[in-house]
Amino acid sequence: MNERAGTPAQQSDLIDVEALIRAYHELRPDVAIPEQRVVFGTSGHRGSSLKTSFNEHHIAATTQAIVEYRASQGITGPLFIGADTHALSAPAMTTALEVLVGNEVRVLVDEFSDFVPTPALSHAILRWNNSPERRAEGEADGIVVTPSHNPPSDGGFKYNPPHGGPADSDATSWIAARANELIAGGLREVRLNEASAVETYDFRGAYVADLENIVDIEAIRRSSIRIGADPLGGASVGYWGAIRDHYGLDLTVVNQEVDPRWAFMTLDWDGKIRMDPSSPSAMASVLAHRDDFDILTGNDADADRHGIVTPDAGLMNPNHFLVVAIDYLFRHRPGWRVDAAIGKTLVSSSMIDRVAEALGRRLWEVPVGFKWFVPGLIDGSVGFGGEESAGASFLRFDGTVWTTDKDGILLCLLASEIRAVTGKSPSRLYAALVEKYGDPVYERVDAVATPAQKAALGRLDGEAIAAAELAGEPITATLSRAPGNDAPIGGVKVVTEHAWFAARPSGTEDVYKIYAESFLGEDHLRHVQAEARRIVDEALG
């Protein structure tokens, strides 16, 4: 924890926006250098122009690759595109538009030149493709220009195919490989034209008007609860006021400032500016208002993550709110399929497992990455999909799909519905669940690893774990594939009756991540974490 974590950003912490944008246009990547290649992680290609990892050539080549990919898949409809408030998002969107127009792709941008949250773009794609009349014009897909909650110096570029969610690894691997090929060829095969002749779409209006079909807005309005919403300078800044006005809620937009430097932020745990609504350090200025509202929320830069603050507990741990949301939704959504499963990533809390069992619902445990929830959300076989990193979405009242990407705005509104319907804060409801199912302690830490060790960990088979015990308990399972869909987890998970740990390599740093949880207290968690390092190190040799 950095000594300045949770304190206001100072001038020395702020980026030079002009230098960042200048580097975007001037620096040329060399794809022979691994750090300068196009690489798609779980949420698209990310990097910084100053490090020559997110520059004009990257975006031009990636967009051309997307054009070629969608053509190979027979995607002939419009492409929705939107961007968040990061400094690199606007120039990257301009580059993308030039390539899309140059390739004669039908493009839809925001009608009011507003920022576009990730869930609003997913909603737009699905709305188009679920309309027989519009679908007859060709399936739609989309691009979101965002690095999510990453620092102000970063840029991000994500492709969402016609299912509306993050593209799967088959698509992203092809796009990245083709983009790097185009860069190596000096962009000679990239077609560009002036970014004109684009159509518009009211992302905000369509999204806001549809919310009454997934959240009990009337219950919120009747309760007259006081709601505070902080966009943290992100793409939801225009959405919260629109929600208030459209539905007549007692809702205050706590901070309406947009600043690509994020000068108003408090520093995250490591001393960096990071718009993470699940971090107490990043949310320190928001937490100062906790007593002013019945429910206070935060979103990250593209609004796909949520932070829930209550007067009695402050900022809720993301796992805790996921548990409350699941328990509430599966008791208050009679229109969902009776066999609709509860989706969780394998590094989310086992408290979810216990709640799922009590609800009599099937648990669907998948690898890290929201893309795994997409098929189940589309056909209604998964009622709720959530990640420990404060990302989730769920079905409409009638059991049909809402978004297939994470929706932080939706989860924030759900917190208000829960408060309005039950009369209790989500944090008090979690305390009641703890009395029934136990009180887990959860933490993620990093351990140093060489590139070779990281690669080995990503390929590790659960059978390579020789240990029989973990922190004094017999090991009941060693997993290298997810129980829900048998997909490789890119690491290993070790489980006992009262604890578990999972180890996965970092995609950007020379470390591996250890997620661990214990129902036997913090001392036992420390024991689990220490043994996790030893077990993984032995397996890696």
Image (cartoon, grey):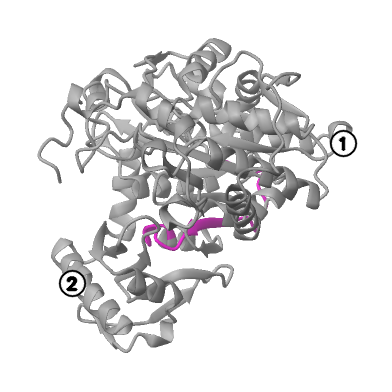
Where in the figure is residue 437, as x and y percent of width and height? 33, 59
Q: Is 272 placed above or below 223 here?
A: below
Tag 1: Cα neighbours inside 10 Å, few (<14), some, or many (≥20)? few
Give the residue type at disc 2.
Ala
Residue 530 - label: 2
Magenta-colored segment: predominant secondary structure: loop
Q: Is 473 placed above or below 284 here?
A: below
Would residue 349 be counted in the magenta stretch? yes
The residue drawn where x is 40% and y is 58% is 507
Which contiguous range is marked in magenta? Answer: 332-352
Q: Pointers 1 and 2 in contact (CB under 8 A)?
A: no
The residue drawn where x is 60% and y is 45% is 186
Secondary element at image label 2: helix
Residue at numbered disc 1: 132
In the visual, does 222 lie left or right of 527?
right
Where in the figure is residue 41, as x and y percent of width and height? 49, 53
Which residue lies most toward the left here? 3
Tag 2: Cα neighbours inside 10 Å, few (<14), some, or many (≥20)? few
Give the residue type at disc 1.
Pro
Would residue 356 be counted in the magenta stretch? no
The residue drawn where x is 16% and y is 66% is 526
Indicate the quadrant containing the C terminus: top left, top right, bottom left or bottom right.
bottom left
Where in the figure is residue 337, as x and y percent of width and height? 68, 52
